[in-house]
């Protein structure tokens, strides 16, 4: 039997009310040469019963996994079963527009040097209605060689917008299962270091925001920091190494502040001690460190004064108030 052009990778854990529209958006694609691989991370009985009914469909394969809570492991399990020339990723709470695959495959096939692609997306709430973007949610695009823009967060790549050559993803090992968070960001960095990227700026995906969408802020920031530390160990040149160091300092400052907001003086102290050795030369780290320390150790009045000053200077320091 001829292999499909695209293998759609969809990991899920419960979320049945969101899973249905996600699956419907795959079946509604104008490009029809795909297979769907659903990797179930030990969902509840209701979700498993729903997925079980799909196993009779010719283009659908369901992988029944023991629960790990690790998205990288779940996605990799599906990747190992993929047979398509391309792989496309869809989270179980997001929705593709009907033209998503068709537009990206047509564009990517014209760009011989590009082995992967991403696209724009629209934020929606849990009901699927458009959600306004905040000041810190202005998505940025970069194309071609985007390793540096990705490091600097000057390009935002959302997982359900990505289409990539399957052999290319498999050749660099897929998702890093040692990472508990930001494993997708790590993969995009590794792809970006090896290939140019094709970009479709129009929105092809609806990304849903709801209460259980994210890992908590501390877990996400720790994951981000771990990815940067891993990237720095990959043998970068001096210029790229300095960029990674600056980004690590920014993330560490934000992590210290998140611990402070959570009321964890121990977390603040541990983060600052761990990051001191590579962050002391960056002004933005000092602002974030001082604000976090005053929140948990100093009188409330002093903390308010520091926060007010940081708010007025945040644009220059890169640390948000």
Image (cartoon, rainbow, N blue to C red):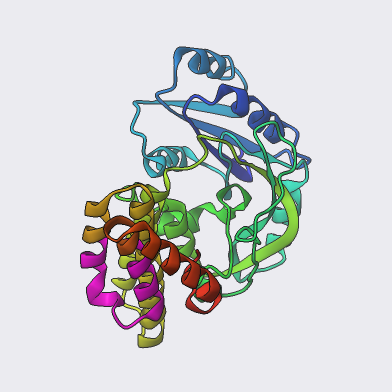
Q: Main secondary structure of the magenta part?
A: helix
Is residue 227 shown left or right of residue 191? left
Quarter of the image for residue 141 reads bottom right
* Residue located at (36% from left, 70% from top): 248
Q: Is residue 320 visible?
A: yes
* Residue located at (64% from left, 46% from top): 5
Is residue 169 shown left or right of residue 112? left
* Residue located at (37% from left, 82% from top): 242
Work out whether residue 310 or residue 43 is closer to the camera in this orientation and state it.
310
Q: Where does the magenta region start and end?
A: 271-292
Above or below, 220 relative to 320: above
Work out whether residue 86 or residue 186 is closer to the camera in this orientation and state it.
186
Rendering coords of residue 293 (x, y %)? 30, 63
Rendering coords of residue 114 (x, y %)? 60, 67
Indicate whether residue 191 is drawn in magenta.
Answer: no
Task: Please state the total of marks drawn on the protein image.
Answer: 0
Rendering coords of residue 59 (x, y %)? 62, 29
């Amino acid at each position: 039997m001829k292999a499909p052009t695209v293998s759609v990778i969809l990991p899920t854990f419960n979320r049945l009310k969101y899973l249905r529209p996600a699956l419907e958006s795959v079946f509604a694609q104008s490009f029809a040469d795909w297979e769907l691989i659903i990797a179930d991370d030990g969902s509840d009985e209701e979700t498993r019963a729903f997925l079980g009914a799909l196993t009779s469909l010719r283009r659908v394969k369901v992988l029944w996994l023991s629960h790990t809570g690790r998205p990288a492991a779940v996605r990799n399990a599906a990747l190992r079963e993929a047979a398509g020339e391309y792989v496309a990723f869809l989270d179980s709470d997001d929705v593709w527009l009907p033209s998503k695959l068709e537009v990206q495959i047509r564009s990517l096939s014209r760009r011989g040097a590009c082995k992967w692609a991403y696209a724009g997306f629209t934020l929606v709430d849990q009901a699927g209605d458009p959600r306004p973007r905040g000041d810190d949610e202005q998505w940025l695009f970069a194309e071609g060689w985007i390793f540096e823009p990705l490091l600097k967060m000057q390009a935002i790549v959302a997982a359900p917008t990505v289409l990539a050559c399957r052999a290319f993803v498999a050749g660099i090992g897929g998702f890093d299962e040692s990472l508990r968070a930001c494993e997708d960001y790590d993969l995009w960095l590794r792809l970006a270091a090896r290939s140019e990227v094709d970009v479709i700026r129009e929105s092809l995906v609806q990304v849903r925001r709801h209460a259980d969408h994210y890992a908590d802020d501390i877990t996400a920031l720790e994951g981000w920091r771990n990815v940067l530390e891993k990237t720095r160990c990959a043998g970068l040149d001096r210029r790229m190494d300095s960029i990674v160091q600056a980004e690590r300092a920014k993330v560490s400052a934000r992590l210290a502040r998140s611990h402070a907001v959570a009321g964890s003086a121990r977390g603040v102290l541990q983060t600052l001690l761990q990051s001191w050795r590579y962050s002391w030369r960056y002004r933005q780290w000092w602002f974030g460190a001082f604000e976090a320390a005053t929140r948990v150790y100093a009188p409330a009045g002093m903390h308010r004064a520091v926060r007010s000053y940081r708010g007025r200077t945040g644009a220059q320091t890169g640390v948000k108030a």
